[in-house]
Image (cartoon, coloured by chain):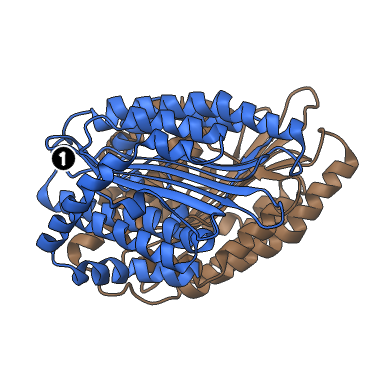
Chain colours: A brown, B blue
Amino acid sequence: MLPALAAAVAAGVAPRRLGAVVPPTTMRRRRTVSASAAAAARSREDVVARMPPLAHREVMVALAGEAEARLLPSEVPDNVAWFGTASGDAVGSVDVRRGAPGSTVDFMLEAWFHRELPAGGGAIDITSLIVFLNGATDAPHFLMELIQGGPTYLVVLLDLLPRRDLPLHPGYLDRYYGATGLDGHRRNIERAPQVRPYVSPSLLVRSLWSPTAVVADVQCGELGGSAAAATLEGIVRGQLATSAMEVLGVWLERCAGGGPAPEMEAAERERMVARDRKISTTSVELNLSVNLPRMFGADVSDRVVAEIHKAFMGNL
Amino acid sequence: MLPALAAAVAAGVAPRRLGAVVPPTTMRRRRTVSASAAAAARSREDVVARMPPLAHREVMVALAGEAEARLLPSEVPDNVAWFGTASGDAVGSVDVRRGAPGSTVDFMLEAWFHRELPAGGGAIDITSLIVFLNGATDAPHFLMELIQGGPTYLVVLLDLLPRRDLPLHPGYLDRYYGATGLDGHRRNIERAPQVRPYVSPSLLVRSLWSPTAVVADVQCGELGGSAAAATLEGIVRGQLATSAMEVLGVWLERCAGGGPAPEMEAAERERMVARDRKISTTSVELNLSVNLPRMFGADVSDRVVAEIHKAFMGNL
């Protein structure tokens, strides 16, 4: 499924087709109407309170709270802000909020998924927080995802996604990655003996990471061992929470709040925005389009993915 | 030392300064004269026969032999084709050969270094084989380096270095990396339990690798254990030799021999060539400029690095 989807995304087929369904003006009007109803109905804390408690969600709630300054109210409809399967074995929430006028933030996407596995097989929990900046700056985007396959197993993705071709722009690499000490946070997380590199099956996804990305697999032992679960929780609340908050701090200060891009020609800016589109379709839609049908079935998944496509069309 | 050097290379200071010392015509004449003498004086086999036997060197000799079709004779002077310290504890050889007219090869650089460590502390052996393609194609360059810190410890770098900004060019990623099955060779080498990821201290070096690069550390146990040394030799002669030869096969057929680049605008080609310069200064000069003084002292090192700079000026 992944290669076919990657090829479609690469060819720009999916976004263009979905964008063609609803003309921009209609789309915006519809979204504003549903947004006002949806915004009143829930908060991030409400969403998380309706899922089983999990250390990784607490960490992500704290990060999302820090990141959300200078965002407009949510615009997604209620059935995207909260959804689930008929049997109740899977619940989820997706929110997209645009940056306020004058802000460098293009949009923030957050996704919270929980699914019970059959026959007491535990649960899968996925949380994503992605904040894209707009063309007023060339500073990196923020991405964090936690994919937990049980109480003792977690995949961690934490990165400031570069918006420039790094071998051509060593000054960019130094400004945002070298001078900010990001590599120390990577080392801090990867120091734990339970941490191994995680290799995405998608070559395109692998090509997005910066040289200081945390792309790791944390395995604390066999499923069910309570000491192993406590070890994972210790890592999540310990070095993972600390380093993630510090990476977000670097991003808020030096990237989102770092002022406009230094002298950039029109053609160069166009190339950067084109690159952003590729990165967002790859990192966001590829990810959701793969995970959502597995967790919630085609009906729920199609509706949520379509809404996210619409939100992106408005932004990009 | 690394960051200061990286900054100088990034700013283009070192190549420009060195290039300014000798005007191109003088340079070419001088190189041709010394080349004829040097070419007669040695072959790759002679060079390797003058160093202690090592499985990793046998593998590299086989690879270099396969890669050298369509190259012009060597142009480096004798004291670059073979050099060493006065005490004889370190010997080395560097060769640069340009691609024949009409070939897609820009140049091939090979480097063979051996250094005994004091007080019976073993030896360090470094072998590099880098083949850059020219602007007639956008296909990736070939790079393989083996850095052996003793009979049981080896760093392996094996990659086709991308010449395009991959997130913007998913078709390129698929053509050269996806459809060629390169990731299977990475997995084959990394499957051994002694293999761990190697992380370069330079963020710029890390940014050069493709998503299927082998950037690995092979640790087979404490220095001196003969079973451990046999294990490393088994890996070198086994999956490493097999996969390296197959990756080179892919490169020879699909990259060096894959025909001209598909429709490419002048500005795009210029950007690619500018990117090539950055990659070669980073991957080749950074590497040599760091390793040579450590192994051979400043005198030998300065002479060899200066000759390599001159060779690059002729090519780039």
Residue B105 percent coordinates (x, y): 23, 38
**B135 or A221, which is in the foreground?**
B135
Q: Residue at x 17, y 52 (%)?
A: B33
Residue A178 percent coordinates (x, y): 50, 68
Work out whether A25 lies above or below A223. below
Binning the other alpha carbons within 10 Å of mark 1 as few (below 14), some (14 to 19) or many (20 upward) gives some
Q: Which residue is mark 1?
A: B136
Q: Residue at x 30, y 74 (%)?
A: A262
Please identify the quarter of the rendering in which residue A185 is found.
bottom right
Residue A83 percent coordinates (x, y): 59, 40
Amino acid type of the residue that numbered disc 1 sits on in the rendered structure: Ala
Please identify the quarter of the rendering in which residue A46 is found.
bottom right
**B143 or B187, which is in the foreground?**
B143
Counting every numbered tag in the picture gives 1
Work out whether B48 lies above or below A135. above
Instruction: Give the letter of the chain under mark 1.
Output: B
**B266 or B221, which is in the foreground?**
B221
Q: Residue at x 45, y 73 (%)?
A: B4
Residue B308 percent coordinates (x, y): 31, 56
Q: Residue at x 71, y 37 (%)?
A: B220
